[in-house]
Amino acid sequence: MSLPKRIIKETERLLADPAPGISATSHEDNLRYFDVIIAGPDQSPFEGGVFRLELFLPEEYPMSPPKVRFLTKIYHPNIDKLGRICLDILKDKWSPALQIRTVLLSIQALLSCPNPDDPLANDVAQHWKDNQDEAIETAKEWTKQHASA
Amino acid sequence: MSSGSMSEDEFIGSDYDDLNSQDEESDMEYEQTEDIGFSEVVTEGQRRRAYEVEFTVLMLADILAAQASAASHVAGILGVTQEQATALLRSFKWNKERLVERYMDNSQEILDQAGVDLNDTRPRVFDRPEGFTCGICFDDSGSAVGLRCNHLFCQDCYSNYLTQKIVEEGECRRIGCPEARCNVVVDEQTIKKVVPPSVLTRYHHFQDRAYVEDLDNLKWCPAPNCENAVECRLPHSSFLTIVPTVQCACGYRFCFGCSMGDHQPAPCSLVKMWQKKCADDSETANWISANTKECSKCQSTIEKNGGCNHMTCRKCKYEFCWVCMGPWSEHGTSWYNCNRYEESSSTDARDQQAKSRASLERYLHYYNRFANHEHSAKLDRDLYMKTEKKMEEMQRTSDLSWIEVQFLKKAVDVLTSCRMTLRWTYAFAFYLARNNTTELFEDNQRDLEVAVEALSELLEKPIEREKIAELRQQVLDKTVYVGSRREVVLEDTAKGLLEARWEFNTNVEDL
């Protein structure tokens, strides 16, 4: 099975011109599977952290969205214990005109702006709503503990 | 119920077009379809009974005609083409009034929402635009497709995108431009130009499905492979007091309220409650409390499976009497006799036990009869196969003609429907509070049950040549009688629901 031209081009561009704070490299034995590293954005509770993710392009890509999951533990209202991400463009708002790069940039933006009103991890979201300062402290704590390079 | 001022009786018997006392929302639903003019496939008798509702069966052609009629009406009002009107109506879930009202307020917004362009002369397909690269496949060859937002993608990718949306996601209401966060709707013209014919057929099929699903007074017949829909104009709020049973042209009888098989005389909410009760394991808990006791010291659950009343809890070693639950130390040596039974200290525990045992037995009483009729209905189906053979046999062995041996088939049909009714009378009865009207109900129920069993017995008799005429008369008489007993039960329960005569031992309206 040959790899669509689009995926080859995207992979090339990710290597040649990576987005700031993001790296994505595909596995040699499976060119649809990517190891992703996102640096915690400045001025966010995740600053200084290095987060590992996995990204997989399903057969139907780009008609279907890529599957993305955090591998590094993270204290975030839109990311659950298993690393699954609640992000509209990964679900019903997916468009085939989006790319791996735009998806990863959106995830990076999600780290800067947690959205406790559309939670995936309910307890974390509640914590964020009840006591935001304390929740941010916990997130910083987790970043130090699990995401330091 | 709605704020209607008419009594329920008049309500059922009245022409619905006169019904102006509904709230605004449902009022619109009535007007929305009232002039569509479906062709009547099933015409109900002049005088309807209390347990019957008015309904119409619609074939696919009727559904298409209804859409066309609504569209041409709207096209006339808004001064748009039939096709444009159809697209507008679809985006408004076929709610004519709301569409016209909103259209008058802000026509451009409504047109955009539905993906309709009134002076549509834009080409959809552009041949090799300059400097074009498809944002989906990253290729720059071939022709491109784009909407008024000018987001161009190559024709193959566009076709794949629409096919994915239609075939995989079953989307037919609103497909957006493939560009991220672009809200422009792909119009039907573009879809027609871009997708292969098989996908277009699917698209139209989904649109017809959506039409029936969008309208509250239409339902698909749930029978397998049946493509008809049924129209029933009763408001959903009335389904607490009416069991809206309809029959499709394919013969399947079902409830318009919940799409389940015929469950007269029990109303939908009660059926849901009963099924939940039968399905969940709340009765396991009932069994436990009826058959076991708790150690009065450590609360472990204990089932006594033999031996004397001197119990020693295996867990905490507490010794007690099984009969009175008091400590054994006060019992002396009366191992099989507890003479302390009347002691007040243990009466509470025993009361509790008796109550739960009674409630379990009550449930089992109704459930067993409910399940039994379900089972018997299955046996009836076997009986029907046998009956067919019997009918052939009768044609051979007697001088009766084919039409004259039909009495057996008719008898089995009546028998099956009566068993279905009987079955649900037990679920109904389970929730009835004990009073005089309930006793009358149970009398009717018993009469039907006795008649059903008598007919069932008659049908299982071996056929003797010389007694065929006699049997035929007996079966005919019984069939008519059983049918009339069923009518009595249904009529009485339906009237009772309308008059709020029944008193339930649970809150039926909660669901």
Image (spheres, coloured by chain):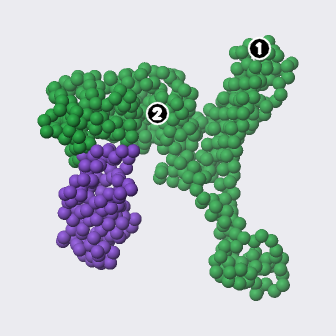
Chain colours: A purple, B green
Q: Nearer the viewer, residue B68 or B448?
A: B68
Residue A133 in view in this figure: yes
**Residue B153 image position (x, y, % from top left):** 22, 38
Q: Which mark is residue B351?
A: none
**How far apart in space, not on screen, are marks 1 and 2 (Cα)?**
41 Å
Q: Nearer the viewer, residue A111 or A12?
A: A12
Q: Quadrant of residue B470?
A: top right
Q: Quadrant of residue A24?
A: bottom left
| Residue found at x 66% / y 67% | B289
Residue to which mark 2 is pinned: B220
| Residue found at x 45% / y 34% | B219
Q: Residue furthest front?
A: A28
Residue type indicated by callout 2? Trp
Q: Is B501 on the left or on the right of B215, as rendered?
A: right
SS under mark 1: loop
| Residue found at x 24% / y 56% | A14
SS under mark 2: strand
B132 versus B17 height, above or below: below
Residue type indicated by callout 1? Leu
Residue to which mark 1 is pinned: B400
Q: Chain of mark 2?
A: B
Q: Chain of mark 1?
A: B
